[in-house]
Amino acid sequence: MRGARLLASAALLAAAPAAAAPWQLPGSDVVSVEAPGGETYRVLVAWPDGPAPAEGWPVLWLLDGEDHFAAAAQTARRLARGRGAPDVGAGLVLGIDAGPLSRRVFDYTPQIGQETISEGFPAQGLKPGGVGTFLAFLHDRVRLVIADRWPIDESRQTIAGHSFGGLAVLHDLRTVGGFNAYAAISPSLWFSDETERAKGRGSDSVELLLAVGTEEGGPSGNSVAAARDYAARAREQGVSTTVLTLPGAAHGDTMLHAMGAIVRLAFEAAGDEGRTQK
């Protein structure tokens, strides 16, 4: 009997292809964009079937694109087909690869008055402080490259990020105001106070989604309480803010738990019957 099993296993191995074909996402592309400092960023793009609406596609921008792009693109396409979400339309999904950890930490964090992150904290020893330059690159360079290749609706631009990426999202809301909707998932609120007045528009045109897991810990302490405190101050500043609590989710999987809500924020139908101010 054992010999028969070995022979069957050998036959299966012999039948396997010498080089497996990698899975690919239809209707997608990778665009390389060079930053002013010489760094090259991969931008992953997925577009819907059919012609764009007259005003162009709404856009969902994802930080840490290498981790979140495929899940977001597939979720967006499924919801746009009306599978339990008839109010969600189609849109363009962009994932900006973060690159090496050192670049990610630098790009997603503000200056904190010290050369490196202190010992005992996440990303200890790495240099922070480049978020302003990184956001300017997104707005001044990447957006133009994308708009040159796909018709986009400048009035419907959403950015989402997780952890340090969530901190970068909140920093844009406070300093640039270059998007219409923001999703900060498990943002690293312990790192920097991003609660100063949000820039630009009021609650009629800007939405903020804060999502945290009930099982998160770390330097922020009680993440749910920290998010609710941030939301209260954001509302005082005129930002329409929703706190999404994710039962059973720890820091590492909150982005997946929140993906449906992120897609809804970006692609929910516009107009009186569409987006709901929260």
Image (spheres, grey):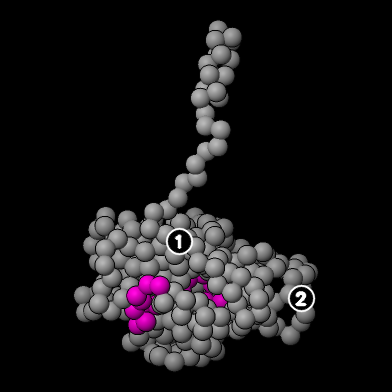
Q: Is residue 270 visible?
A: yes
In this rendering, the label closer to the viewer, 2 or 1: 1
Q: Is residue 155 left or right of residue 199?
A: left
Furthest residue in direction left, as rendered: 273
Asked where in the image residue 153 lies, by quadrant, the reply is bottom left
- Which residue is under mark 2? 116
Please say if 2 is above or below 220: above
- Asked if the residue at tag 1 contacts the one at tag 2, i.e. Cβ–Cβ closer than 8 Å, the answer is no
Q: Which structural element holds mark 1? A: strand
> Which quadrant holds residue 258?
bottom left
Q: Which residues are magenta?
A: 149-171
Measured as percent of width and height from the top left, residue 161 is found at 52, 69
Return the x and y of residue 201 as percentages of the image width and height.
40, 90
Q: Amino acid at mark 2?
A: Thr
Q: Residue under circle 1?
A: 29
Residue sitting at x 52%, y 38%: 20
Magenta stretch holds residue 60: no
- Compared to residue 15, the image places residue 199 above or below, namely below
Q: Residue at position x 45%, y 61% from top?
A: 29
Q: Dot 2 lies on which element? A: loop
Residue 264 at x, y percent in the picture: 34, 67
